[in-house]
């Protein structure tokens, strides 16, 4: 038996909990309570309770608890759901009891967060282990265990648990859709936005088929976040607009305020400050009208309104941004505080000051980067460049001397924010095409190197390794091997680089690659070459990684050896097995070969 089954003949409550506004659900609960003699005028109650009275009362309590959980009244939800579980237990309805217990655990998790996780996992394990692992209550218990593991930050365990629950959920369409929501949310948190989008699209479709507007609204909100992570701004807007519409119908203030705040930020990204201001004002009105007020979304709405007013030249911008910053500090919200620091830096950079005071962009950028949000750092770098470009020119009338370097830094950070990269390229193609050419060439060289390192994961064991020292190595990507080279670069530090070749590459090709690098740098190299007979590239670097993952390659001693070499010297390790003829060919290229 499901917890609401006893009410099936007298009420559409299961459908209303999925799709109706809270007021309509509450009215239906009160109507059922009157019918059962649990509310209203006692004189109007029937002389005897209807057949199955205790079960009907338990189902009614469960319905009230489910609505309280949906609306965020978590203390009431815990009391009502635990009471329903006890009532079902007294009537010997184990499945309904366990499902009510699961919902009570979920309410405690939402209310108490990390502090409730250990006891929640123990109780959910007991529920799942009490009978057939394929029954609905066991699937729901597995789902909520995965939620607890996500809350404590154990993403790997959460993924395992949720995938296990998903495999067992096929007979239960509603539970399957909810588990897909949770998996999608987990993958958004992990930054696996492609996987999140695929799962959440499936979840949203299942919710629509079941008429579950509550579940669909949750799926759409996370779909918007996944699309933003992929840089698909229009897809994000469509999903968030759907969430806002659904939440408005349901009377879900939290979901609607969230969607409107995201939409206002999105409008700012698309350059529509007037739309952003209207959306932020609406978000604030919804958040302030909730009981209690949703202060986090009030803060986000105030920030979006302040940035929109700034872009529109409204003098009220500073007050809105200051209010947002104060709210974020009061709430102890790390992302909000980082965004407020960004806003302060922007305000200082835009303020006329003689002489100009140094602006602290770093604090905000470091906080955002430490939160794992490189896309936000890219947006900050772009805003900084735009403010500097709009400022009066330097005394010599030219750009800032490090403007090209800042442009490359923005392009590198924007690898995590494709829409920022695209917007900046469009600006550069008209305003500074030479800078665009430099950025594009650097990115092409980096992509080529990444491709070679990825290809080396398929190569048989055996690598030739070169430690290269020269004063210009580590600057402007000069050590990245060119198109015609056979090498891949695994380290590019100030003064030092490490190149790899498959062991099967002919020595003369290795010599030509080093000769080309010497020409690019415009100075003699100090190079130590060695063979790593079992060396392999296991994994190329991810964006932001310090280098590729290698096996059977030792470069520390090789790098240290370069310090003892003379300019132009090429030291060959005996293990290479290169004969005098090879040495002569390398000397013909201008290297001083030593062994």
Image: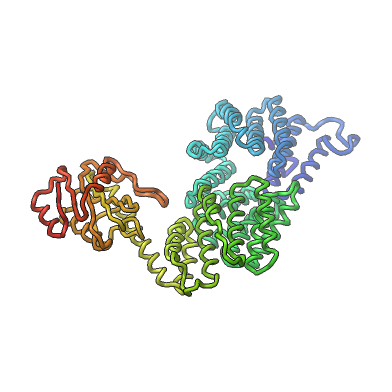
Give me the residue at 75% from left, 52% from top: 289
Q: Nearer the viewer, residue 172 or 400?
A: 400
**Residue 349 rendering spot, x and y as whole percentages:** 58, 63
**Residue 295 rendering spot, x and y as whole percentages:** 70, 49
**Residue 346 rendering spot, x and y as whole percentages:** 59, 61
Give me the residue at 17% from left, 45% from top: 573
Q: Nearer the viewer, residue 7 or 305?
A: 305
**Residue 183 rendering spot, x and y as whole percentages:** 53, 44
**Residue 588 is drawn in which quadrant?**
bottom left
Q: Nearer the viewer, residue 502 or 179?
A: 502
Q: Quadrant of the N terminus?
A: top right
Q: Nearer the viewer, residue 155 or 463?
A: 463
In this view of the protein, can residue 191 be seen by the observer?
Answer: yes
Q: Is residue 44 above or below residue 442?
A: above
In this view of the protein, can residue 256 be seen by the observer?
Answer: no
Q: How is the image coloured?
A: rainbow
**Residue 96 is drawn in which quadrant?**
top right
- 10 displayed left or right of 485: right
Q: Is residue 312 above or below residue 376?
A: below
Q: Which residue ends up furthest to the right in the rendered image? A: 43
- 591 displayed left or right of 137: left
Q: Which residue ends up furthest to the front in the rendered image? A: 355
Number of labels in the image equals 0
Give me the residue at 59% from left, 43% from top: 174
- 156 displayed left or right of 444: right
């Amino acid at each position: 038996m499901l917890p609401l089954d006893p009410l099936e003949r007298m009420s559409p409550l299961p459908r209303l909990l999925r799709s109706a506004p809270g007021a309509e659900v509450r009215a239906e609960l009160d109507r059922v309570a009157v019918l059962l003699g649990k509310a209203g005028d006692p004189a109007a109650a029937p002389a005897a309770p209807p057949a199955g009275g205790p079960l009907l009362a338990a189902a009614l309590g469960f319905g009230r608890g489910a609505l309280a959980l949906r609306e965020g009244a978590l203390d009431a939800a815990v009391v009502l759901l635990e009471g329903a579980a006890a009532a079902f237990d007294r009537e010997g309805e184990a499945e309904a009891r366990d499902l009510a217990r699961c919902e009570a655990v979920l309410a405690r998790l939402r209310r108490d967060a990390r502090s409730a996780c250990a006891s929640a996992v123990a109780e959910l394990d007991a529920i799942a282990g009490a009978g057939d692992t394929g029954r609905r209550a066991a699937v729901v218990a597995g789902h909520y265990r995965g939620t607890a593991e996500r809350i404590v930050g154990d993403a790997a365990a959460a993924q395992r648990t949720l995938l296990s629950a998903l495999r067992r959920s096929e007979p239960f369409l509603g539970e399957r859709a909810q588990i897909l929501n949770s998996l999608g949310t987990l993958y958004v948190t992990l930054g696996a936005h492609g996987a999140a989008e695929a799962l959440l699209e499936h979840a949203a479709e299942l919710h629509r088929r079941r008429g579950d507007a509550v579940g669909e609204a949750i799926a759409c909100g996370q779909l918007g976040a996944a699309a933003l992570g992929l840089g698909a701004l229009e897809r994000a807007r469509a999903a968030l607009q759907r969430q806002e519409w659904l939440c408005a119908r349901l009377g879900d203030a939290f979901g609607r305020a969230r969607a409107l705040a995201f939409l206002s930020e999105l409008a700012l990204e698309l350059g529509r400050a007037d739309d952003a201001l209207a959306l932020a004002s609406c978000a604030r009105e919804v958040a302030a009208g909730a009981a209690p007020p949703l202060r986090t979304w009030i803060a986000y709405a105030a920030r979006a309104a302040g940035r929109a007013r700034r872009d529109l030249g409204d003098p009220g911008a500073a007050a809105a941004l200051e209010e947002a910053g104060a709210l974020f500090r009061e709430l102890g919200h790390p992302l909000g505080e980082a965004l407020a620091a960004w806003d302060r830096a922007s305000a200082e950079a835009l303020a006329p000051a003689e002489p100009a005071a140094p602006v602290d962009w770093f604090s905000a950028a470091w906080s955002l980067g430490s939160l794992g949000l490189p896309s936000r750092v890219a947006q900050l770098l772009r805003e900084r460049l735009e403010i500097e470009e709009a400022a009066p020119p330097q005394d010599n009338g030219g750009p800032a001397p490090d403007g090209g370097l800042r442009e490359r830094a923005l392009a590198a950070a924007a690898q995590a924010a494709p829409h920022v990269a695209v917007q900046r390229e469009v600006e550069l193609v008209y305003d500074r095409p030479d800078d665009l050419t430099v950025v594009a060439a650097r990115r092409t060289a980096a992509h080529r190197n990444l491709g070679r390192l990825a290809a080396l994961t398929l190569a048989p064991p055996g690598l030739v390794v070169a430690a290269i020292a020269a004063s210009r190595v580590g600057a402007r990507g000069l050590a990245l091997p060119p198109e015609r080279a056979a090498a891949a670069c695994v380290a590019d530090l100030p003064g030092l680089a490490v190149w790899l070749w498959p062991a099967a590459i002919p020595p003369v090709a290795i010599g030509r690659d080093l000769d080309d690098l010497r020409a690019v740098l415009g100075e003699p190299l100090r190079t130590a070459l060695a063979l790593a007979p079992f060396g392999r590239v296991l994994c190329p670097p991810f964006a932001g990684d310090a280098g590729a993952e290698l096996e059977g390659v030792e470069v520390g001693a090789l790098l240290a050896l370069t310090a003892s070499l003379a300019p132009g010297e090429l030291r060959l390790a005996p293990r290479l097995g290169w004969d005098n003829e090879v040495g002569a060919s390398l000397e013909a290229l201008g290297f001083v070969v030593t062994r």
